[in-house]
Amino acid sequence: MDFLHRGGVLITQHLERDYRAYYDFLHFMSNVGDPWNTFSVYFLHWFQLNQAVGTKMIWVAVTGDWFNLIFKWILFGHRPYWWIQESQIYPNHSSPRLDQFPTTRETGPGSPSGHAMGSSCVWYIMVTAVLSNTASQMDKSSVTLHRLTWSFLWSSFWLTQVGVCVSRVFIAIHFPHQVILAVLGGYSTLRFVCPASTCRCKRPTSLRAFFGSFLLSQ
């Protein structure tokens, strides 16, 4: 793990040194992935547009946030800014310097990233919902338009995920491997809640039964 941590610190230093001019943009991208926005922004708007999509989104977000807390409790990953303050692998007090931003003050386990994990779940739901809606209204003359829409939305999805992940590394809250693990964990959570290829979610009673059985087993 020290190898991953040292490599992650070098990447964070590179981002802080060469991309400091983009701090405002990266800070914005970090807010885009904030789990709080799922409940206060994304869910409220989507529930008004389509109750089925809104319900799907909230179940995925809640389950993903729950799994994220469980993973953090199990993995108990370090955070870059605080790790270099405590690590003993740097000889003669030669610890590298990382800048501290207002949001860098987050403490507690850092693996996997809650922002990256939640963002990958929620934005996947939004993209597939839009594509499903456009496909249902598509005729033979609009195949090209649908393909362009598909390319644009999935490109936007991945650019958003990369932006959220890079922003969390930039402000020294997460190591690179933690945000990558979070994206994979987000997709796995999505497949758990919405196992079908159409992303039709499990019934709420099934999820309640799962959480209830877990709590009773403790």
Image: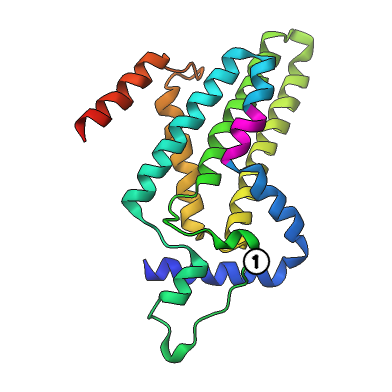
Instruction: Establish if 129 lies above or below 218.
Output: above
User: Residue 91 sits in which quadrant?
Assistant: bottom left
Instruction: Establish if 214 lies above or below 53.
Output: below
Q: Secondary structure at mark 1?
A: helix
The residue nearer to you, when weighing 161 against 92, is 92
Image position, residue 100 (x, y; %)? 61, 69
Name which residue lies at 32% across and 27% down. Answer: 211
Image position, residue 36 (x, y; %)? 59, 39
Residue type at mark 1: give it: Leu
The residue nearer to you, when weighing 211 against 97, is 211
Q: Is residue 123 visible?
A: no
153 left or right of 110 in image = right
User: Is most of the magenta stretch helix, strand or loop?
Assistant: helix
User: Residue 144 sits in which quadrant?
Assistant: top right
The residue nearer to you, when weighing 141 against 109, is 109
User: Which residue is denoted by mark 1 in the rendering?
Assistant: 15
Magenta segment boundaries in residue numbering: 35-42
Q: Is residue 179 magenta-colored?
A: no
User: Residue 127 sits in which quadrant?
Assistant: top right
Instruction: Establish if 73 lies above or below 107.
Output: above
State which quarter of the image contains the N terminus: bottom left
Name which residue lies at 53% across and 25% down. Answer: 58
65 left or right of 149 in image = left
111 left or right of 22 in image = left
